[in-house]
Each structure stands twice: as structure tokens, then as C-alpha cells.
Amino acid sequence: MLEQTPQRLKCWAAGVLLLVCTGGCLWRGQRYNTFTTRTPLSQNEILILGFMGGREPWNNDERGVRKLALKLRSMNLPDVHVETVENKKRSLAIELITNAFDRNHDGKLDQQECASARLILYGQSFGGAAVVKLARQLKKIGMPVLLTVQVDSIGRDDAIIPSNVASAVNLFQRNGWFIRGEPEIRAEEPTKTTIIGNFKYDYSHKKIDISKVSWMKKSFRIAHTRMEHDADAWEKVEELIMSAIRKRGG
């Protein structure tokens, strides 16, 4: 009999429950032409990528990640571009990032282009784990990340933040019976990455309106769902992102 580590069991259970809660539906998935950002970006322009949780499509306007992206877009922030990505589509994110910062149009990112990139990543649930995985991929090519934000992150190896990330923050809950977010992120190299904080949210008594959420989600991952619909949590994410935008020139 094969032994399963607690972390693997956690990921397996989360995956099964999320599949059940989405009805096991399948779709074609996101394609590159869903992005609206003009590329390449000019010097000092910033790209923000939000990774969707579960099996949610990139354009589900009812989900927290997408809602925040649309809100940031509506602010018409100068030189700021925001996109949402399905958490299984990191390859699309890499393609967009390459096109965004490949200013000499040679199809790859050189040292100067990487160094001048301005990038922020955030995500919820499996999207939170996708943020860390993408940051690791970017480290291999020498690209810095201004900020990573994980919201109730679910997935393997989502606790160690790679050294190319300047600042990182983690929002999580531990009330769920089956699905609980990563409780503590740590810097791979503390001298290079600032962990802004691991912020715990308690849903044992806090009232969050999830009346429109399916009964399956409320039954199997109620605390995880409450956090996704918690306006206070997303206000915190917005505050962190806006702070990073203001510091982008530093």
C-alpha cells in the first residue's frame, strides 16, 4: 500500500472536492487571445496577473480574483495593465509576460528586459499556488516580481517564496473541515524577499453572504468559500497591490 504524505492528501482532497463542487465540468480553457494588454509594454509600465481558483474560467466575473481585476481596470491607473488567468494556464502567463517585456522583439527576454520588468502576481485557492509556481519559473530566467499575494492558497510547495520576489503576503483561513489555506509562507532567502505577513481570517462567527453559492460549495468548503466572498479580504489585497504600484519606481 502506497503511503501518502499529509500534504499530498490535502491536495488530493482539495482537488476532488473542487471537482465535485464544479460539477466535474470541462471546457476548452483560456486562450491567448483573451488577453487585452497591448504588448510590448513601455518602460515602467506594470503588469498585474490574477490567477483564478478551482476550475473557474478566466472571465468568471462572480469570483473574487476577477472582481478585483475589473475594479483595478475601472480605476484607469496610468501605465497599469491587469489580466486574469486560469490557474492551469501558466504557459499563457509566461507567453504574455514574454511579449510584454520583450522590447527588442527578438522573442526572448534578455537580462536588461528582465531587470526592468514590473510584475505583480495574485491568486486565490489553486490560483494562490499557481502564483508561487510561476514566480519560480520566472526566477530561472532572472525576472523579478514586485509582489505576490496568496489568498487561501491550496497546492503543493506553495509555502516557500522564491528569491526573485521582492515582497510577499499570505491571507488564509483554518476554519474549513477539508480545505484550509497555507498558514505560513516563508522566504527562500530572507535578505531578498520581505514577507509582509501571514494574515489569518476567522470565519467561525463572521457573517459573509454566500446565499447565491451552490449548496455543494457551502457543504464541502464553506470557510474557503466565505473567504473568497469576504470583501474585507479583497480590500486588503487591493491595498497591498496599490502600495506596490506606488513603489514601482523604487
Image (spheres, rainbow, N blue to C red):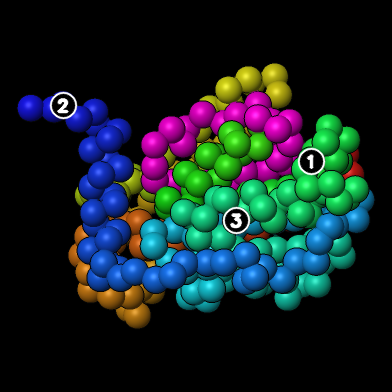
Where residue 199 sits: x, y (%)?
50, 43
Q: Is residue 72 above or below residue 203?
A: below
Question: Observer-nearest residue: 28 or 121?
Answer: 28
Q: Which one is earlier in the sequence, the residue at label 1 or at label 2?
A: 2
The residue at which mark 2 appears reads as 3
Q: Which one is earlier in the sequence, the residue at label 3 or at label 1?
A: 3
Where residue 181 sits: x, y (%)?
39, 45
For badge 2, the amino acid type reads: Glu
For badge 1, the amino acid type reads: Leu
Question: Observer-nearest residue: 202 or 30?
Answer: 30
Q: Counting other residues with Cα less than 10 Å from the Cα at mark 1, is it few (<14), some (14-19), or many (20 or more)?
A: many
The residue at which mark 1 appears reads as 109
Q: Look at the numbered disc 2 and give the secondary structure of its residue.
A: loop
- Residue situated furthest front in the rendering: 106
Q: Which one is earlier in the sequence, the residue at label 3 or at label 2?
A: 2
Q: Is residue 129 above or below residue 112?
A: below
Instruction: Report the span colored magenta.
Output: 140-165
Which residue sits at x=62%, y=53%?
A: 93
Question: Observer-nearest residue: 115 or 188?
Answer: 115
Query: For the residues carrying marks 3 and 2, which lies nearer the camera in this image?
Result: 3
